[in-house]
Structures are given as C-alpha cells and as structure tokens.
Image: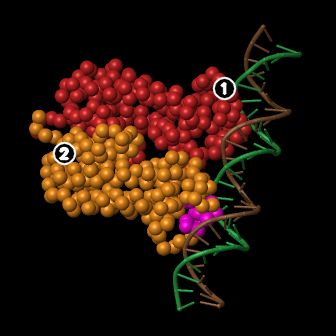
Chain colours: A orange, B red, C green, D brown
Amino acid sequence: MNVINESPRRKELTRQAAQLFVQEGFDRTTVRMLAQEMGIKSGSLFHHFRDKQEILAAVIEEGTQNALVMARDALARCGTSADARLHAMARAHLETLLTDRNAHVVALYEWRRLDPEARAHLSHLRDAYETLWEQVIDEALAEGLIHGDRFLVSRFVMGALNWTVRWYDPQGPRTPDDLADELVAMITRRPA
Amino acid sequence: MNVINESPRRKELTRQAAQLFVQEGFDRTTVRMLAQEMGIKSGSLFHHFRDKQEILAAVIEEGTQNALVMARDALARCGTSADARLHAMARAHLETLLTDRNAHVVALYEWRRLDPEARAHLSHLRDAYETLWEQVIDEALAEGLIHGDRFLVSRFVMGALNWTVRWYDPQGPRTPDDLADELVAMITRRPA
DNA sequence: GGGTCAACCAAGCAAGCGCTAGTGTAAACG
DNA sequence: CGTTTACACTAGCGCTTGCTTGGTTGACCC
C-alpha cells in the first residue's frame, strides 16, 4: 500500500475508479471490476489502496480539493462587487461540477458510504467550500442584490447547482457559464 | 407472489422497506434485513414480491403516485393566478417530499438501481409530474412573474426543492410552507 | 368437512464478495 | 555485487448474497 498519497499512478487509478463508481454505484462496483478497468488483477489493487473504502475516499477528496482550489482562484481573479463574485462562484462551481463530473457525482451520491473517519476528514474540506459560498451570499445580501434568509438562499442555490449533474448535457447548446448566468439572473432582482 | 398490486399487507411492507432503503441504501439492504424489519423470515418475503427489484419499484411507485395526486389536488384547489399556482405547486412538492420523505429519498437516490422495465414504467409517472411543473412555470413566465429560460428555470427550481431532503430538519423552526414561500420569493421579481 | 389459498417457515444452494498470503520480477540503490 | 522497493501475479479463504424448494398452518367457503 502506498502511504505517500497521490503518486501519479494512484491518481490515474483514482480517476478510473470514479468513472466506474458513477456508472455502477459504489456498492455494485466490485474490486474485480475496478482491477479490470485498471488493467491489473484484483489482488494487485490492494497494493495501492488499503481497502475499497480508501478508493472511495480518494475519489471524493480529489474532487472536493479541486472544487476548493477553483473557487478560491475564481474569487481571487474577479472584481470586488457582490455581483461579480456571485457570478464567479456560480461559474466556478459549474465548471468543476461538469468537467470533473465523475468525482463530484460520487461525492454527491456516495457520501454516505464513507466510513466515519474518512467522512470526518472530508467534512472539513466540504465545510471550507460551503463557507466560501456563504460569504458570497452574505455579500450579495448586504448589497441588496438578493433578498431573503441567508441559510435558505444558500441551500436553494446549492441545490439548483448540484442538481445540474442530473440533467446537464455537455453536448447540448448551453455552456456551464450560460447556466451560471441564468441562475444568477433568476435570483437577483433588478427593478421591474 | 401477489399479482394483484397493493394489498394492504404489501403496502405496509413497502413502507417499511422504504425506511430501510433510506437508512442503508438499496444495495446494502439485504433481503434478510428487510424480512427482519417486516417480522418474517427472508424466504417469506418472496411470497409478496417477485424479487428485490420489485420492492424498490413498489416503493418508488408509491411515492411518485402520491406526489402526483397531491400536486393535482393543490392546483385544483388554488386560484388561477400564476402566483397562486406557483405557490401551490411549491408547497405541495415540499409537503409530499417531507412527509412521504422515505419514498421520495429512495426515488431520488436509488432510481438508477431500477431495471429497465420498471424504469420505463415509472418514467411515465415522473414525466406526468414534471409536466405539471412546466405548465405552472410557463404561466408564471407568461404573466411576467418570473423571467428566463423555461427549461433552465424549471430545472433550477426542481433542484432547489429536491435538495431540501438533504438538509431540512422537520424538528426545526421552519415549516415546508415557509420554504416554499421563501423559494417563490427568491425567484419572483418584484419592483425594487 | 374436504378443498382452497394466502401467508409463513426451515434449510440450503450457487454465485459472488472483499480481502489475504505467498511469490515473482525488474528497476533503483549503496 | 547484494539488497531494497514498487508493482504485479496466482490461488483461494471465509463469508454473505439473492433466491429456491418443499412443506406447514390457520382462516375461510360451499
């Protein structure tokens, strides 16, 4: 087993695992299926990961970490107006969600399969990400760009965004940026 | 096996199965666990359901059917203004989602575990429900209550609503109606 | 009061599961 | 050179899985 995290080999294996987890679901994906996808035998898999759980944790960690990095970058790059920051967050969110799609679908739908330790560790990452969102929402509320309950608004927005993985078609005419703009337009009130 | 659907016994068993599916997930719920919850032995379970898949289909069908009935009732009962109808749909949606919670969580998260035949059958039910939503969204757009792309708006709204099952606490201070009102307020533009 | 039938049980099969043990090998290192 | 290290293999153990089989029970019916 590889104690040093994130060898390039392991990273590639993690990516392939994510694909299978999305296709089949975590429970239905057997170590034999994973091994075959990776081009090795099932026993060899446990050289890279302690157990099946650890593969799941690796997939989710990878996705969440990327989301956090991209969101921070986007916020650093955009202007200071609440409107610009709201757009930036929405775009960054959809960008990771739809490019790094497999990892995020796993994070959203297989979270409950994590054992308590892994969950505790990854909760911190997720909380850090959600805190970013709440800050941006707060700013938008303070500027009067949007109105309503801080808690509810941020949950509704997260719901609308995360739901996209269920229907969004990358082959279709709409880009992630289109979605982000439309969503922000929907919740920001301009004078009628 | 019971060919005539929906004997009272079967309905009760379905309710109990839904609970377990939510707690453990479909794949992790064994027929032995289901049988124990139902107070029978695992073999006896197959007197009521052809196989494990059929239990899942029964759970989802029950939930979706209820949602459809409640939504139609709500629309029939409310006024004709787009605002009233939008409120009515949102309230009805959250009402079923949060009272009939188990069945709906299963429908949302275990849909992919359905075999193709069951999925085809249940898709019709779900489509009928989503059509109701799109009609109401259309009316709201036509009245100028909301703006934007019909397809995107309805997806965003569905996402915001369905996401509630992940964070809503029935013990908390907010009622389902509170959530519905807040959501409608968020997306309807009033003069600033 | 014999026949019917839904509901249940005990026992177990065949397949598949996650994971381990022990070994082979080729490159990297001192 | 000998040793270590990373990565892969074969073989299979112990257990759980969904489901089947053959049979029992008690309520109801003409």
Q: Residues within 10 Å of mark 2 (few under 14, many from 20)?
A: many
> Is label 2 in a helix, a strand or a loop?
loop
Seen at 47% across and 29% down, the residue is B123
> Is label 1 in a helix, a strand or a loop?
loop
Disc 2 marks a residue whose amino acid type is: Ile
Rendered view: A34 above or below B60: below
Q: Quadrant of residue B190?
A: top left
- Which of the pair B180/B25 is nearer the observer? B25
Q: Position of residue A43 (x, y in %)?
A: 64, 63
Q: Which mark is residue A146?
A: 2
Rendered view: B174 above or below D7: above
Rendered view: B188 above or below A50: above
Q: Which residues are magenta?
A: A42-53
Q: Is residue B14 magenta?
A: no
Q: Position of residue A68 (x, y in %)?
A: 33, 60
Which image quarter is the N terminus of chain B in? top right
Q: Residues within 10 Å of mark 1 (few under 14, many from 20)?
A: few
Seen at 29% across and 46% down, the residue is A176
Q: Which mark is residue B2?
A: 1
Q: Which mark is residue A5?
A: none
Seen at 38% across and 22% down, the residue is B73
Q: Position of residue A98 (x, y in %)?
A: 36, 49
Dot 2: chain letter:
A
